[in-house]
Image (cartoon, rainbow, N blue to C red):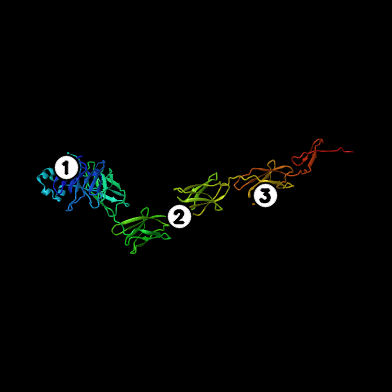
Amino acid sequence: MDNIVVADKATQQISEAAWGDMRLNGPSVVKVPVAPAQVATATRSGQDLLLTLKSGEHITVSQFFTANTAGQTSDMVFENENGALWEAHYDAQAFKGFAFEPLASIDELLAGAGVVGSATPEWAIAGLGVLGAGGAVAAASSIHSDGGGNGGGDVAAPARPTQLALSADGLTVSGNGEAGTTASVRDAAGNLLGSAVVGSDGTFQITLPAPSPDGETLQVQLTDGAGNVSLPGILQTPGVLADALQGLAISADGLTLTGHGEPGATIVVRSLDGSVRGTAQVAADGTFSVGLDTAHLNGEVLQVSQADAAGHAETVTFNALDVTPPAAPTELAMASTGLELSGRAEPGSTVEVRDLDGGTLGSTLTGTDGHFQVLLSSPRNNGEILEVIAADAAGNISAPAILATIDTTVPPAVTDLAVSADGLTVTGFGEAGAGLSVSDANGYLLGSGNVDSDGRFSLTLDTAATAGSQLTVMERDAAGNTSPPATVVAPGAFAPNVPSGLALSSDGLTLSGTADAGNTVRVFGRLASY
């Protein structure tokens, strides 16, 4: 590290000191062999300056902030390896760090202190050479040429950054500059607020740790790989409105937005896509009323901005009232298990499935695509009627959508079967409304009917059941589900009908005729007496 050079403003003496802590005897011009880009922090402790580099090195310059009786204070000049100079500006009363500005010649600082004009020949011969002052160093030559005593290195400073802008939230500085350089933002006190490398397209964005105070001046500089620093670009943060937006409200019909703002300011209401929905001017009492082009009653997000004549502006977000119920759910379908109901409803709404008594069977949140699937507490596959509703975040409830579930439940077998004594009536219990069929042992249909609403039935057969014969009774519900068979035996031992149509063959050996099916026919006879 090169030596530190000190020019005492009172004694007009120039001295050199090795890199490290030092003490000034009075206000001086201190030249340090460090480029501004190498500085991490500059802090004040009493009258002392503590300079910390990004490498971790640090020095203390004692009595740097001590002023003489004439009010003079010390100055500091930074010099990079190519001889380019920067003056460090600072506020001694409220020190917050340095703001760097390229320096064409150190003569100006020395002459201002009355040093150069009255310097001894030793100063002119030795001192100016050590400091790099006067004709020995001219920053215009150092900064803007590659010749001279700099060995042909890059000493051309980047151009000043352009098209500087500050984001609305005050957290991002953007602009254009030389590609590959480092853009740095400092506050008025010289404190580094953020930096970023300029992209290959010549643009940069610098994220700040916090919004700068309103009306503050920010300095943006570019530093190239050789340590050359551009002239600063100036960015002024916007001022503030005297009265912030407050008390925003929307009318019951969704057509008027009211609130309070800065008298005379212009109010603009926009939707999220930037479309203007209405404008108005804040009255002298601070109130405003904006007529909107359409009703906003479905929770729409609006952006409300106010701007005064000086260009100070603010924008806030406002959610309109949501008093619009969702549409009834659609595309309802029940899984074959009867346990899962699917469909579509307003995205983000809560879907609830209820029985006709109002009992909740299940609920779920609708996805962003409007699709939903509700897992029910128990199977619903017996023809039940269900109501499906959707409720939005504001509590608005849709009209119910009705779903009749598919009946896939087989009815139970009929019970308490009985056959009347005459074999013409069968009674018992079954599923209300189900159809009945009665068949004999050969499957021949003897009669049919329906179960009464109370679950009882009394069925008159078309043909009387034969005493002791087995009858089969089955029921079938409205969905076509058939119950297991139930059987009953006809009571009694009824006498068969008298055989008829008797005929004897010509040889007297065969008797034919008709009798009840299944009966045994016996022929009895006696010898005729003559």
Residue in front for this viewpoint, 248 or 500: 248
Whole-Å distance between the Cαs marked 3 and 1?
123 Å
Within the image, what quadrant is residue 446 found in?
A: top right
Q: Is residue 132 visible?
A: no
Q: Is residue 349 visible?
A: yes
Q: What residue did someone put label 3 on?
A: 457
Q: What residue did someone put label 1 on?
A: 16
Circle 2 or circle 1, nearest the eye: 1
Q: Position of residue 480 (x, y in %)?
A: 60, 46
Q: What residue did someone put label 2 on?
A: 394
Residue in front for this viewpoint, 338 or 444: 338
Query: Tag 1: residue type?
Result: Glu
Q: Cβ–Cβ below 8 Å for labels 2 and 1?
A: no
Quarter holding the C terminus?
top right
Query: Tag 2: residue type?
Result: Ala
Earlier sequence position, callout 2 versus callout 1? 1
Query: Tag 3: residue type?
Result: Phe
Whole-Å distance between the Cαs marked 2 and 3?
53 Å
Q: Position of residue 63 (x, y in %)?
A: 21, 48
Relative to 502, 160 lies left or right: left
Q: Give the class, few, some or many, for how many residues have Cα within 10 Å of label 1's Cα (few <14, many ≥20).
A: some
SS at mark 2 in the image:
loop
Outermost residue to the bottom:
284
Q: Position of residue 256 (x, y in %)?
A: 39, 60
Residue in front for this viewpoint, 491 or 479: 491
